[in-house]
Amino acid sequence: MSTTNIVVGLQAQNTIKLAAYGTAEESATALGLVKGGISIEHDSTQQEIMVDQYLGPIDQVVTAESLKVKTTLAEATLNNLSIAMGLGEVSGSSANLTTAADKTYTLYINVKGAQGKKRKYTFWKTKINGKTTQTYKRDGETVADIEFTVLVDTSKADTERFGKVEDIA
């Protein structure tokens, strides 16, 4: 039995980057270290097809689909906190707390893959969800939760509508 297909842990650096929609990873902003990993959640709703002749469903049809990416940013820089709140990058030493701009982003995630390879996720079109939590405690780190909703990119083929994942040697 081989354990090369068992993946443990994240890649140490450049695990998550954010760019304006359609911008290449080389021009993306690194969001720094994360705490607790990165969660990619896919959900689909299916409608069962029922007919009178059979007691059980004869098929299922997908009627809705969603994809979310969640993580906690461990580096509580002003820039990272501003990005987590959907306010964009900071220029200077302050960020205005206001309603987040309605922007779309391309999200890049690099993690460990099976068999010693690197795994790269590219989510073409995302939005930062409106709920962000920051906690300042005497006995803990200051972190910022961030959640992305992955949107369908209608400029891509149906088979690539959310993005792609690839293993790189």
Image (tube, rainbow, N blue to C red):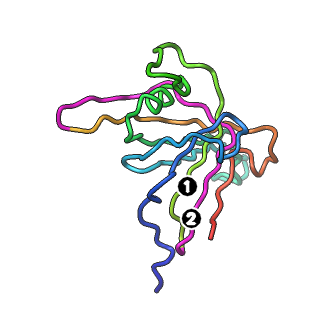
User: Which of the pair 40/24 is nearer the observer?
Assistant: 24
Q: Is residue 59 magenta?
A: no
**Is 164 or 66 nearer to us in this picture?**
164
Is 117 magenta? The answer is yes
Which residue, as the protein is rendered here, is positioned at the far front?
92
Describe residue 112's horizontal placement relative to residue 140 as left or right: right
The residues colored magenta run 115-139
State the SS at label 1. strand
Give the residue number, with chain letter if any, for mark 2: 118
Type of residue at label 1? Asn
State which tag comes first along the sequence, 1 or 2: 1
In the image, residue 58 above or below residue 3: above
Residue at (53% x, 14% y) in the render: 99
Looking at the rendered structure, the kind of residue marked 2 is Lys
In the visual, does 139 lie left or right of 34? left
Q: In this view, does 81 lie to the left or right of 155?
A: left
What residue is shown at x 46% (from left), y 35% (from top)? 146
Mark 2 lies on a secondary structure that is strand
How far apart, in angstroms, are the residues tagged by discs 1 and 2? Answer: 7 Å
* Image x and y of residue 140, in percent: 22, 38
144 to the left or right of 58: left
Callout 1–callout 2 Cβ contact below 8 Å? yes
The residue at the point 77 percent across, 52 percent down is 159
Residue annotated with mark 1:
110
- Residue 14 location in percent, x, y? 51, 51
The number of callouts visible is: 2
- Examine the image and state in which quarter residue 155 appears: top right
Quadrant assignment for the C terminus: bottom right
Q: Depth check: 47 or 94 in front?
A: 94
